[in-house]
Amino acid sequence: MMKKYTILLLLPLLLIACTKEKTLDSAVEPSTSIKDKPQSTNSHVEEFFMKDGSIAHFQGDGNEYATYTLRTEWLDDRHVNVYEDNGGVVMLRSYRLGTDKIELLQEKPSDVEGTATTLQAIQNMKPLRTYLEFPLAEGATFDAWTVTATDADLETPLQPFRHVVIIERSFNDGALSRVYFAAGFGEVKREYIANEDGHEFKVTSVITQIE
C-alpha cells in the first residue's frame, strides 16, 4: 500500500518546460487543429507547454494511475493551468513563466473548495517551488532535479521526437523519477523506476494522442 501511494504521489511530478540556448525542435509540428497559445516574448519557455485547449492522452503501464490526460489552459502569456485526470482525481497545477525560470504556483485537486482557476486569482500567488530553470544544459541542476540530456531521440505511439530534454530525480531509497520533454508539446513521457524485493519495478506513461 505504501509503495502504491508513493507512486501515485510521484507520477504527477512534473516538471515541464524549457530549452537550451538554441531552440529545440520536435520531429513533427503539433496538430494545427489545436488553438494557438497567446503570443509571448518567452518563446523558448512556452514551447514546453501544449497549446491552449489541447488534451493530451498518456498510456500507462505498471500502475493504475499511470494512464491519464493533460488539458492545458493558457490564462495569458505568463500563466498556465494544467489539469491532469488519471481517473481517480483531477489535479490542477498552475504555473508562472519567467525569463529564467518556471514556477509552480499551486498543486491541488481541482474540485477542492477555494481552488483558484482564474488569472485574477492566481497571478499574485507566491510560488510553491521552481519548476524549471533556464538555460537547460546537460548536467545542470535545480531543486532535486538534474538535466541528463538535451538532444535525445524518443519513439512514442504518437510520433518520434528528437532534441528531447530529459530530467531525473533520485530518492533515498534508490528509486528514480525521469521526465521527457519535446518542444511544442511539453511533457511526452514519464518513468518511475524502483527496486522491489530485488526486482526492478517500473511505471511508465507515454503520449499517444492529442485532441
Image (cartoon, rainbow, N blue to C red):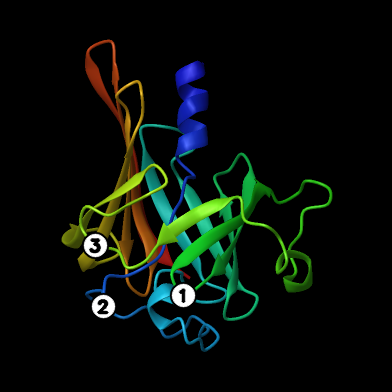
User: Quick one: 146 or 70, which is closer to the camera?
Assistant: 146
Going from the N terminus, do you reach mark 1 or mark 2 first?
A: 2
Going from the N terminus, do you reach mark 3 or mark 2 first?
A: 2
Q: Residue at x 38, y 69 (%)?
A: 185
Residue 153 pos. (x, y %): 16, 61
146 relative to 3, above or below? below
User: Quick one: 174 or 153, which is closer to the camera?
Assistant: 174
User: In which image quadrant can residue 177 be found?
Assistant: top left
In front of the other: label 1 or label 2? 1
Q: Label 3: how many residues lie within 10 Å, few (<14), some (14-19) or many (20+)?
A: some
Q: Label 2: how many residues lie within 10 Å, few (<14), some (14-19) or many (20+)?
A: few
Q: Which mark is residue 28?
A: 2
Q: Residue at x 55, y 86 (%)?
A: 38
In front of the other: label 3 or label 2? 3
The residue to which callout 3 is attached is 137
Residue 136 pos. (x, y %): 30, 64
Q: Which mark is residue 33?
A: none
Q: Residue at x 40, y 69 (%)?
A: 48
Q: Residue at x 46, y 81 (%)?
A: 42
Q: How far apart in space, not on screen, are marks 1 and 2 (Cα)?
A: 26 Å
Name the amino acid type tagged 2.
Val
Is residue 178 left or right of 107 when viewed as pictured? Answer: left
Residue 58 pos. (x, y %): 41, 53
The residue to which callout 1 is attached is 99
Q: Secondary structure at mark 2?
A: loop
Considering every residue shown, the one lying at the far top of the view is 197
Name the amino acid type tagged 3.
Ala
Residue 76 pos. (x, y %): 63, 80
Q: Secondary structure at mark 1?
A: loop
Going from the N terminus, do you reach mark 1 or mark 3 first?
A: 1
Name the amino acid type tagged 1.
Thr
